[in-house]
Image: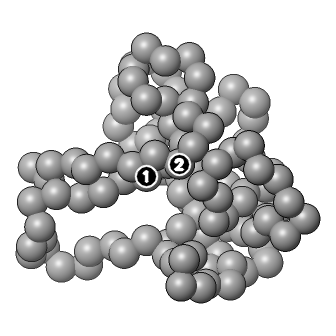
Amino acid sequence: MVNNHAAHCITSPLGKPRYVRFGLITKLSYSVTDNIHRVMQNILHPNYTTEGTSQYHDIALLKIAPPVEFSETLKPACLNRAHNVKSPTAIASGFGKLNYFDTKESLRLMKVVLDIL
């Protein structure tokens, strides 16, 4: 999430996402109080392609409604606007596959520390 109207997403064999949920730690819990938002617009990177095995430009923005209400535990991603990265590492989180050969995604929110090159 980069502001209270947009969220990062990837394409899926099931089609474009229609709803997004924020603030989850596990995919197994559903509640009427979940932070659910309707996807109003999918904005794919103009050079993204699903052909071949290329991972380049694999990013999209989703315009959502209503706006997200930020809290102490739900905040937008911190995007570095300067070119002076002070840390040699970054943290990524999500529910994706745990390795290249997995067929299923993690049911719990995972994080990984990445080296910045």
Percent across and percent down for residue 61 are 56, 59
In the image, taking residue 54 as reference, residue 76 lies left or right, namely right
Instruction: Tell me what residue is drawn at x 43 percent, y 52 percent.
Output: 93
Q: Amino acid at mark 2?
A: Leu
Residue drawn at the location 62% of the way across and 38% of the way down? 107
Q: CA distance from mark 2 to mark 1?
A: 7 Å
Image quadrant in which you'd find residue 56: top left
**Above/below status of 68 relative to 91:** below
Task: Specify the amino acid type for callout 1.
Answer: Ser
- Which residue is the site of mark 2? 109
Q: Residues at badges 2 and 1 in contact (C-beta under 8 Å)?
A: yes
SS at mark 1 in the image: strand
Residue 66 screen position, x and y as percent: 79, 78
Residue nearer the viewer, 105 or 3: 105
In this picture, is 72 found above or below 74?
Answer: below
Find disc 1 in the rendering and name its residue: 93
Does the image show residue 84?
Answer: yes
Q: Residue at x 72, y 59 (%)?
A: 21
Is 113 positioned to the left or the right of 33 in the image?
left
- Seen at 9% across and 60% down, the residue is 88
Tell me which corner region of the image, top left, top right, bottom left or bottom right, holds residue 24: bottom right
Q: Is 81 or 109 nearer to us in this picture? A: 109
Which label lies toward us, 2 or 1? 2
